[in-house]
Image: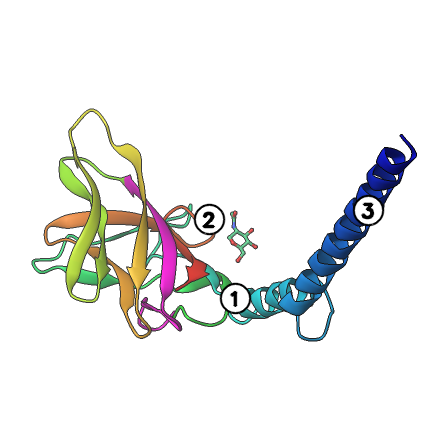
Amino acid sequence: MKIMMKVISLQLIVLVCLSFGQADDSIKQHQADDPNGNLGSSSLSDVSQLSAMSSAVNVAFSAALRPPSQDSEGYGHIGPFTAATNLVHKHVITNIGNAYSSSTGSFTAPVNGVYFFTFTSYSWAKTVNIGVALYKNHEEVALVYEHQDKGDNEDFASSGITLKLVKGDKVYLVLPSGFMVTANAYRNVSTFSGFLIFQM
Ligand SMILES: *[C@@H]1O[C@H](CO)[C@@H](O)[C@H](O)[C@H]1NC(C)=O
Protein backbone atom coordinates (compact mmCIF):
# COMPACT_ATOMS: atom_id res chain seq x y z
CA MET A 1 0.00 0.00 0.00
CA LYS A 2 2.74 2.48 0.99
CA ILE A 3 4.77 1.51 -2.05
CA MET A 4 1.76 2.05 -4.32
CA MET A 5 1.25 5.60 -2.88
CA LYS A 6 4.92 6.44 -3.44
CA VAL A 7 4.74 5.27 -7.06
CA ILE A 8 1.61 7.33 -7.69
CA SER A 9 3.07 10.53 -6.16
CA LEU A 10 6.29 10.02 -8.10
CA GLN A 11 4.25 9.70 -11.30
CA LEU A 12 2.39 12.91 -10.40
CA ILE A 13 5.65 14.82 -9.88
CA VAL A 14 6.99 13.57 -13.23
CA LEU A 15 3.73 14.63 -14.95
CA VAL A 16 3.81 18.10 -13.39
CA CYS A 17 7.45 18.56 -14.45
CA LEU A 18 6.63 17.48 -18.00
CA SER A 19 3.78 19.94 -18.35
CA PHE A 20 5.91 22.83 -16.99
CA GLY A 21 8.56 21.92 -19.53
CA GLN A 22 5.97 22.09 -22.29
CA ALA A 23 4.69 25.49 -21.20
CA ASP A 24 8.24 26.82 -21.19
CA ASP A 25 8.93 25.45 -24.66
CA SER A 26 5.82 27.07 -26.15
CA ILE A 27 6.81 30.49 -24.79
CA LYS A 28 10.29 30.14 -26.32
CA GLN A 29 8.72 29.07 -29.61
CA HIS A 30 6.59 32.23 -29.66
CA GLN A 31 9.50 34.53 -28.96
CA ALA A 32 11.48 32.89 -31.76
CA ASP A 33 8.88 34.20 -34.28
CA ASP A 34 10.15 37.75 -33.79
CA PRO A 35 13.95 38.04 -33.62
CA ASN A 36 13.76 41.12 -31.36
CA GLY A 37 11.09 39.64 -29.15
CA ASN A 38 8.86 42.66 -29.94
CA LEU A 39 5.51 41.07 -30.60
CA GLY A 40 3.33 43.10 -32.98
CA SER A 41 6.04 45.47 -34.23
CA SER A 42 5.81 44.23 -37.84
CA SER A 43 2.08 44.91 -38.14
CA LEU A 44 2.58 48.46 -36.78
CA SER A 45 5.15 49.29 -39.47
CA ASP A 46 2.77 47.84 -42.14
CA VAL A 47 0.10 50.31 -41.02
CA SER A 48 2.43 53.31 -41.18
CA GLN A 49 3.70 52.23 -44.63
CA LEU A 50 0.09 51.97 -45.88
CA SER A 51 -0.88 55.40 -44.59
CA ALA A 52 2.26 56.92 -46.16
CA MET A 53 1.27 55.37 -49.52
CA SER A 54 -2.34 56.56 -49.42
CA SER A 55 -1.38 60.15 -48.54
CA ALA A 56 1.24 60.35 -51.31
CA VAL A 57 -1.07 61.51 -54.13
CA ASN A 58 -4.23 63.60 -53.83
CA VAL A 59 -6.09 64.13 -57.10
CA ALA A 60 -9.58 65.63 -57.49
CA PHE A 61 -11.04 68.17 -59.89
CA SER A 62 -14.28 69.78 -61.04
CA ALA A 63 -14.66 72.28 -63.87
CA ALA A 64 -17.57 73.99 -65.61
CA LEU A 65 -18.14 74.92 -69.23
CA ARG A 66 -18.43 78.61 -70.10
CA PRO A 67 -20.14 79.87 -73.32
CA PRO A 68 -18.18 81.64 -76.09
CA SER A 69 -20.95 84.27 -76.17
CA GLN A 70 -23.95 84.76 -73.91
CA ASP A 71 -27.52 86.04 -73.81
CA SER A 72 -28.91 88.38 -71.13
CA GLU A 73 -29.19 85.47 -68.66
CA GLY A 74 -25.64 84.24 -69.31
CA TYR A 75 -26.57 81.27 -71.55
CA GLY A 76 -24.77 80.41 -74.78
CA HIS A 77 -24.41 77.38 -77.08
CA ILE A 78 -21.33 75.47 -78.19
CA GLY A 79 -21.81 73.68 -81.53
CA PRO A 80 -23.08 72.08 -83.61
CA PHE A 81 -19.80 71.61 -85.53
CA THR A 82 -19.13 69.40 -88.56
CA ALA A 83 -16.34 67.50 -86.74
CA ALA A 84 -16.03 66.12 -83.21
CA THR A 85 -14.58 68.90 -81.03
CA ASN A 86 -12.80 68.85 -77.66
CA LEU A 87 -14.78 70.59 -74.94
CA VAL A 88 -12.65 72.80 -72.70
CA HIS A 89 -14.24 73.36 -69.28
CA LYS A 90 -12.53 76.67 -68.57
CA HIS A 91 -14.00 77.50 -65.16
CA VAL A 92 -12.03 75.51 -62.55
CA ILE A 93 -14.01 74.85 -59.36
CA THR A 94 -11.57 72.39 -57.74
CA ASN A 95 -8.15 71.21 -58.97
CA ILE A 96 -6.26 69.36 -56.23
CA GLY A 97 -3.02 68.03 -57.69
CA ASN A 98 -3.37 70.15 -60.89
CA ALA A 99 -4.01 67.09 -63.10
CA TYR A 100 -6.80 68.93 -64.98
CA SER A 101 -5.80 71.56 -67.54
CA SER A 102 -8.29 74.39 -68.10
CA SER A 103 -6.49 75.37 -71.33
CA THR A 104 -6.74 71.95 -73.06
CA GLY A 105 -9.73 70.52 -71.11
CA SER A 106 -7.77 67.29 -70.50
CA PHE A 107 -7.17 65.39 -67.30
CA THR A 108 -3.75 63.67 -67.28
CA ALA A 109 -3.32 60.75 -64.85
CA PRO A 110 -0.37 61.61 -62.57
CA VAL A 111 -0.01 57.98 -61.30
CA ASN A 112 -1.19 54.47 -62.22
CA GLY A 113 -4.51 53.86 -60.53
CA VAL A 114 -8.28 53.61 -60.63
CA TYR A 115 -10.11 56.88 -61.20
CA PHE A 116 -13.76 57.95 -61.28
CA PHE A 117 -15.16 60.56 -63.67
CA THR A 118 -18.59 62.11 -63.91
CA PHE A 119 -19.96 64.61 -66.43
CA THR A 120 -23.19 66.49 -66.96
CA SER A 121 -24.32 68.36 -70.04
CA TYR A 122 -27.06 70.95 -70.18
CA SER A 123 -28.92 72.01 -73.30
CA TRP A 124 -31.57 74.49 -74.25
CA ALA A 125 -32.36 73.94 -77.91
CA LYS A 126 -34.89 72.56 -80.36
CA THR A 127 -34.57 69.87 -83.06
CA VAL A 128 -30.89 69.10 -82.46
CA ASN A 129 -28.76 66.26 -81.01
CA ILE A 130 -27.47 67.14 -77.58
CA GLY A 131 -24.91 65.37 -75.38
CA VAL A 132 -21.19 64.78 -74.80
CA ALA A 133 -18.75 61.87 -74.98
CA LEU A 134 -15.92 60.97 -72.60
CA TYR A 135 -12.66 59.87 -74.22
CA LYS A 136 -9.67 57.99 -72.81
CA ASN A 137 -6.69 58.88 -75.02
CA HIS A 138 -8.19 58.51 -78.53
CA GLU A 139 -11.02 56.11 -77.65
CA GLU A 140 -14.61 56.99 -76.75
CA VAL A 141 -15.55 55.20 -73.50
CA ALA A 142 -18.87 56.83 -72.50
CA LEU A 143 -21.60 58.88 -74.16
CA VAL A 144 -24.78 60.66 -73.10
CA TYR A 145 -27.10 62.03 -75.76
CA GLU A 146 -30.63 62.77 -76.79
CA HIS A 147 -32.38 64.07 -79.87
CA GLN A 148 -34.24 67.19 -78.77
CA ASP A 149 -37.60 67.45 -80.45
CA LYS A 150 -39.68 70.56 -81.06
CA GLY A 151 -41.79 70.37 -77.92
CA ASP A 152 -38.98 69.65 -75.45
CA ASN A 153 -36.15 72.14 -75.42
CA GLU A 154 -34.44 71.90 -72.03
CA ASP A 155 -32.55 68.88 -70.73
CA PHE A 156 -29.73 67.59 -68.54
CA ALA A 157 -27.78 64.43 -69.41
CA SER A 158 -25.29 62.81 -67.02
CA SER A 159 -23.01 59.78 -66.78
CA GLY A 160 -20.15 58.44 -64.63
CA ILE A 161 -17.40 55.93 -65.28
CA THR A 162 -14.60 54.15 -63.40
CA LEU A 163 -11.36 53.81 -65.38
CA LYS A 164 -8.06 52.05 -64.73
CA LEU A 165 -5.39 54.44 -65.99
CA VAL A 166 -1.64 54.38 -66.34
CA LYS A 167 0.43 57.48 -65.68
CA GLY A 168 0.09 59.90 -68.63
CA ASP A 169 -3.30 58.65 -69.89
CA LYS A 170 -5.57 61.52 -70.92
CA VAL A 171 -9.31 61.79 -70.21
CA TYR A 172 -11.41 64.58 -71.76
CA LEU A 173 -14.89 65.41 -73.04
CA VAL A 174 -15.80 65.66 -76.71
CA LEU A 175 -18.78 67.24 -78.43
CA PRO A 176 -19.68 64.72 -81.17
CA SER A 177 -20.08 66.08 -84.69
CA GLY A 178 -23.50 67.67 -85.22
CA PHE A 179 -24.13 67.86 -81.45
CA MET A 180 -24.80 70.92 -79.31
CA VAL A 181 -24.34 71.77 -75.63
CA THR A 182 -25.34 74.83 -73.60
CA ALA A 183 -23.23 76.58 -71.00
CA ASN A 184 -23.82 79.53 -68.69
CA ALA A 185 -21.38 82.32 -67.91
CA TYR A 186 -22.15 82.27 -64.16
CA ARG A 187 -23.91 78.99 -63.36
CA ASN A 188 -22.08 75.67 -63.41
CA VAL A 189 -24.63 73.71 -65.49
CA SER A 190 -22.31 71.67 -67.77
CA THR A 191 -19.57 70.11 -65.64
CA PHE A 192 -16.70 67.61 -65.72
CA SER A 193 -15.33 66.05 -62.49
CA GLY A 194 -12.92 63.29 -61.54
CA PHE A 195 -10.80 61.88 -58.73
CA LEU A 196 -8.31 59.13 -57.91
CA ILE A 197 -9.96 56.28 -55.99
CA PHE A 198 -6.75 54.30 -55.30
CA GLN A 199 -3.29 53.70 -56.75
CA MET A 200 -2.31 50.34 -58.20
C1 LIG B 1 -19.89 78.23 -59.84
O1 LIG B 1 -18.73 77.75 -59.17
C2 LIG B 1 -18.08 78.74 -58.35
C3 LIG B 1 -16.88 78.05 -57.73
O2 LIG B 1 -15.84 77.95 -58.63
C4 LIG B 1 -18.99 79.24 -57.29
O3 LIG B 1 -18.35 80.23 -56.53
C5 LIG B 1 -20.23 79.81 -57.93
O4 LIG B 1 -21.13 80.20 -56.93
C6 LIG B 1 -20.89 78.79 -58.84
N1 LIG B 1 -22.01 79.44 -59.51
C7 LIG B 1 -23.28 79.11 -59.28
C8 LIG B 1 -24.30 80.07 -59.85
O5 LIG B 1 -23.62 78.15 -58.63
**SS at mark 1 in the image:** loop
Residue linked to disc 1: 58
Q: Can residue 65 be seen?
A: no
Along the viewing direction, whichever of 61 and 21 lies nearer the viewer: 21
Numbered badge on residue 187 = 2
Going 31% across and 48% down the picture, which residue do you hit? Answer: 161
Q: Position of residue 188 (x, y in %)?
A: 44, 49
Give the class, few, some or many, for how many residues have Cα within 10 Å of label 1's Cα (few <14, many ≥20): some
Q: Is mark 1 within 8 Å of ligand 1?
A: no
* Residue extent of the magenta highlight: 102-123
**What is the number of callouts on the image?**
3
Numbered badge on residue 16 = 3
Q: Position of residue 9 (x, y in %)?
A: 87, 40
Quarter occupied by residue 195: bottom left
Q: Is residue 44 above or below residue 178?
A: below
27 horizontally vs 66: left or right: right
Give the class, few, some or many, for how many residues have Cα within 10 Å of label 2's Cα (few <14, many ≥20): few
Q: Earlier in the sequence, mark 1 or mark 3?
A: 3
Amino acid at the residue labelled 2: Arg
Along the viewing direction, whichever of 188 and 23 lies nearer the viewer: 23
**SS at mark 2 in the image:** loop
| Mark toward the viewer: 2 or 1 | 1
Q: Earlier in the sequence, mark 3 or mark 2?
A: 3
Residue furthest right as drawn: 2
Along the viewing direction, whichever of 74 and 2 lies nearer the viewer: 2
Q: Earlier in the sequence, mark 2 or mark 1?
A: 1
70 horizontally vs 23: left or right: left
The answer to whether residue 108 is magenta is yes
5 horizontally vs 18: left or right: right
Going 42% across and 45% down the picture, which residue do you hit? Answer: 73
* Scheme of colours in the image: rainbow
